[in-house]
Image (tube, grey):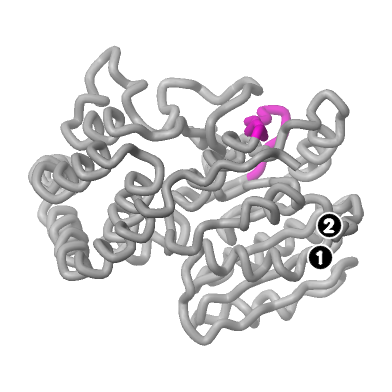
Amino acid sequence: MHIYYNALMDIVIVNWNAGPQLAEAVASIVQYHHDLISSVIIVDNASIDDSLALVEAITGSQFPVHIIHNTENLGFAAACNQGAELASSAYLLFLNPDTRLFENSLSVPLAFMQRPENADVGIVGIQLVDEHNHIARSCARFPSLGIFAAQTLGLNRLPGLRHFTHPMAEWNHENTQQVDQVIGAFFLMRHPPFKFLGGFDERFFVYFEEVDLSLRARQAGWRSVYLAEARAFHAEGGTSRQVKAHRLFYSLRSRLLYGFKHFTPWQAWALLGVTLVVEPVSRSIFSLLRGGVQDVRNTLSGYSMLCRDLSNIVFRLRTTSMEGIKFSRKV
């Protein structure tokens, strides 16, 4: 059945105790929407702060703001999919609540995607800057076992080996270019391929969900482009700063899920071994050098949660490895 999409974009924001940042993000959309927005959809993952009340106090919006109230934290991937179900536009923008749009944040990437020569561009990200106007290294390469191992051992910290890391830290992000993956903080995607690919894989509670979707999009024939001609503000770390140990736990778990979904079996099991045996030691050493005793405690707490959840993770790993890589053709 043919699905009609209008030419505008819907913005999906997943909120979890973002405080005033969420209202600031929505206010920036109200200021710089330029009649390009069909709706803003906020999916709240059982927040207990006043972030939604601050949004509801905003007036002057020329587009509807829909709020989905979840009674539990379903995770980022699942919440994004929830929001996308309400969207009807040709473009979906997944936007973090710790971002703020500028004058050209929406108009430039949308115009770029609508050019005929960019018809095979499925995903676009833009230049992200912090409170000091420093450009963030917001793009990444598709990770491999070698990259994960180099990061675990700290080899990517050595001169000449900086490219052995998942983020593209060696590149200054001052020019437009095709990349493997753009960060999920500003993730503009065409709606038809998003729907065709089944959206985000909800087994990734948080982290690596955009890496997985970007890889599946590439396999289906869609390119990802980083656009340096447009900017937005992004507070690195965002709400995940509140829970450093949990952040590490979910990052490690999602990494394992990604490995078992996209690596060969021996590479996936090697990744599991490196993650459980080698990395706790190396990461604890780096944590001690970087942040002191409290940082080490957060690290050990994250690995403790990983070990306690291992049976559940192994079950997910089995179902993921049985599925394998999902190949599909571009629509």
Which secondary structure class fits the magenta region best? Answer: strand
Give left or right: position of 293 versus 321. Answer: left
Q: Quadrant of the C terminus?
A: top right
Q: Residues under labels 1 and 2: Cα distance?
A: 9 Å
Residue 248, quarter of picture: bottom left
Secondary structure type for disc 1: strand
Q: Position of residue 103 (x, y in %)?
A: 79, 43
Report the side of 170 relative to 85 (left or right).
left
Residue 328: quarter of image: top right
Q: Callout 1: 10 Å neighbours few (<14), some, many (20+)?
A: many
Which amino acid type corresponds to the residue marked 2 in the rendered image? Ser
Residue 303: percent from left, percent from top: 17, 59
Magenta segment range?
221-232
* Callouts 1 and 2 close, C-beta under 8 Å: yes
Residue 167 is left or right of residue 5, and the answer is left
The location of residue 225, given as percent across then percent down, is 65, 30
- The tag earlier along the polypeptide, 1 or 2, is 1
- Residue occupying image coordinates x 27% and y 43%: 268
Instruction: Say whether residue 225 is magenta.
Output: yes
Residue located beneath label 1 in the image: 39
Disc 2 crowd rating (10 Å Cα; few below 14, some 14-19, many 20+) is: many
Determine which quarter of the picture holds residue 2: bottom right
Amino acid at circle 1: Ser
Q: Position of residue 285 (x, y in %)?
A: 9, 42
Mark 2 secondary-structure assignment = strand
The residue pinned by badge 2 equals: 89
Q: Which mark is residue 171?
A: none
Residue lying at the far top of the rendered structure? 160
Look at the image and say whether residue 173 sits in the magenta stretch.
Answer: no
Callout count: 2
Q: Residue at x 25, y 37 (%)?
A: 267
36 in relation to 128, above or below: below
